[in-house]
Image (spheres, coloured by chain):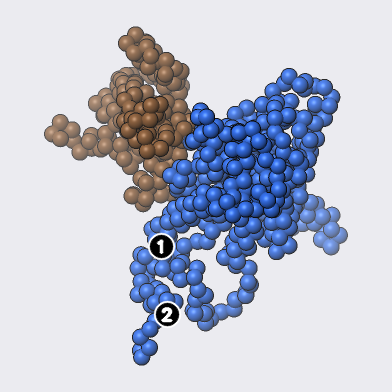
Chain colours: A brown, B blue
Amino acid sequence: MAILSKKDTNLILDPLADNNPITIQVLGICSALAITAELQASVVMALSVIFVLGVGNVVISLMRNIIPSKIRIIVQLVVIATLVIIVDQVLKAFAYELSKTLSVFVGLIITNCIIMGRFEAFALGNNVWRSFLDGIGNALGYGVILIAVGFFRELLGSGTLFGIKVFGDPVTKTGLYATGYENNGFMIIPPAALIVVGIIIWIQRSKNRALIEEN
Amino acid sequence: MRDKRLTFKKRLHILKHHYRGKKMAPAFNAFHTFLFTPNDTTHSGGHVRAADDLKRTMNTVIMALIPILVFSFFNTGYQHYAAIDAASGVPRTLDLMGNFFTWENFWLGFTLVIPLVIVSYGVGLLVEFIFAVIKGHEVEEGYLVTGMLVPLIVPVDTPLWMLAVAVVFGVVIGKEVFGGTGMNILNPALTIRAFLFFAYPTWMSGDKVWVHGAVDRAGTADAISGETILGYLAQNNASEYSYSTSDMFFGFIPGSVGETSAFLCLLGGIFLIYSKIASWRIMVSAVIGALVMGLIFNGVVDAGIIGETSKFYGLMSFDFWKHLIVGGLAFGIVYMATDPVTGSQTNRGKWIYGFLIGFISVMIRVFNPAYPEGVFLAILLMNVFAPTIDHYVIRGNVKRRMKRLNNASVFTGPGEGKEEELKVETA
């Protein structure tokens, strides 16, 4: 990548793997549990967070020298809230059904710890370009896990992907269902997301032992 | 080596030495020690010699389960044929030698239950072997009892692949992630049961699954009922079943494969208490807990707070002591609640732990709208709380003894550091 220096590349790649916001920092878990029952919702959620965090990081970075440090949290909240409302309104206008599925969770992006965390930890102390990359990187890291969890939960729980029936029709018993296969109702309920995220964390740490904390 | 004819044991021994230090070693070791007593003896150090090692403990529990397994063969067959008779309008009357302990019943039950046992053990031990090889430790005996419990607590028609999936989940998520046998927080057999319940509710609840054939025959002219007593009660249909109290006690009723006979659970419980494997405190307090909750519900009905039209009337007005002999309560108390790993460790903790299991079981049973049974949920819930209970029991003990120490006349007063030291030690 000629456009990005090595340092900048790491800003994007680190959060995807060894510094993942969900599996390593264990932030933003609530939305990962709540909306990952369907892959489509996961993807939309991931895109929303990419937009909010990417733009938000840029805005905060632009203002970093003029925000009085005593009221910086309030300023950050205003920025996030504005962006989230934009996302919410766009979804309501162009994908109404989907916005009903996501319901309050789009609004709750405001409380997503990853966003506030990146504002505090990165955007307040770095220039615009680097903040932008950091925002995109972290949101991607969040999105990748969300999509992975959504993939397994929708596939095993409903037998569909993006609403398309993969295994056949469970009602008329075609395809795989003819052999007696049944959807796993456990994957639909939120605790399953916790277990899937747990398994991802488990696999990641057994691949990269440096990530295992000392007791 | 003049004698070329090696015994099987010798061959295993040679294999073991051949693979020593290699990845597959634990698998061979487990096989060897499972089948034979190894010749190896320790040569150094002092050792406590005790016969009640983990394998012995596990085997004792399995022995206590064998009568239940055999009974379940007969009962599975009997319930199937009895339901067919009932559907054709000629209800059976139980005749112990005439139509219960028959070859026909036994064979039908045998062909249905044994596959469950084989799948449970086969899949579970395979997972254990794989983990032993990956982690490089010896295969643990923990699955021996779990593997026997699992087929006994599922409905007889549970598809085998579902059982296999659930066993993999239960052993990996319920046990191995915590570090294997002895480290688990939740009872693995109940984790498997809970997984099945939440993943495939249509196969785990309702009025079809409890008798073999009821699901397949549903909607056809040969339809038969597979409803349990608790199921009837939950629908306020207490008059529709014709099981006598002795049927309930001895277990001639529909239900999960091995849970029906409170009598055999009682015998198994006495055997486990006599052999000092299971805690009598947990069993007794769980029975008390269930009776207390049952009495409260009976009292509520007698006081007229719950009328006959209430959806809880059927289960609440059920005689309080009968809760012990229907459903899985007796089986759960004897074989599940007493699991030494997941239960409370302190004596006072065992009383609290057991009491709450009985109490909550009956409470969930009555209030669970979808499924009139709650023993497995109650035990899993208390599994989670067991360490907390123990913690407070120990803290209470420490507090009492600290008081005694402070009041003791031998000391002029506790040393400055002593108290802190004690706290650290016992925390």
Residue B265 in view (yes/no): no
Residue placed farthest to the bottom in the image? B2
Q: Position of residue B355 (x, y in %)?
A: 74, 44
Q: Is residue B353 left or right of residue B27?
A: right
Q: Position of residue B58 (x, y in %)?
A: 59, 61
Q: CA distance from mark 2 to mark 1?
A: 28 Å
Residue at horizontal 70%, vertical 33%? B241
Could you confirm whether marks 2 and 1 are on the same chain? yes
Residue at x 80% of width, y 21% of height = B305
Nearer to me, A172 or A45? A172
Q: Up-down: is B309 above or below B409? A: above
Q: Amino acid type of disc 2?
A: Thr
Residue shown at 50% from the left, 73% from the top:
B36
Disc 2: which residue: B7
Answer with mark 2 or mark 1, whichever residue precedes in sequence.
2
Disc 1: which residue = B136
Q: Residue furthest right?
A: B409
**Secondary structure at numbered mark 1:** loop
Question: Which chain is home to disc 2?
Answer: B
Q: Quadrant of residue A187?
A: top left
In this view, which residue lies farthest toward the left? A2
Q: Which chain is home to disc 1?
A: B
Q: Amino acid at mark 1?
A: Gly
Which residue is drawn at the image coordinates 37% and 74% (left, top)?
A: B15
Describe residue A68's horizontal placement relative to residue B105 as left or right. left
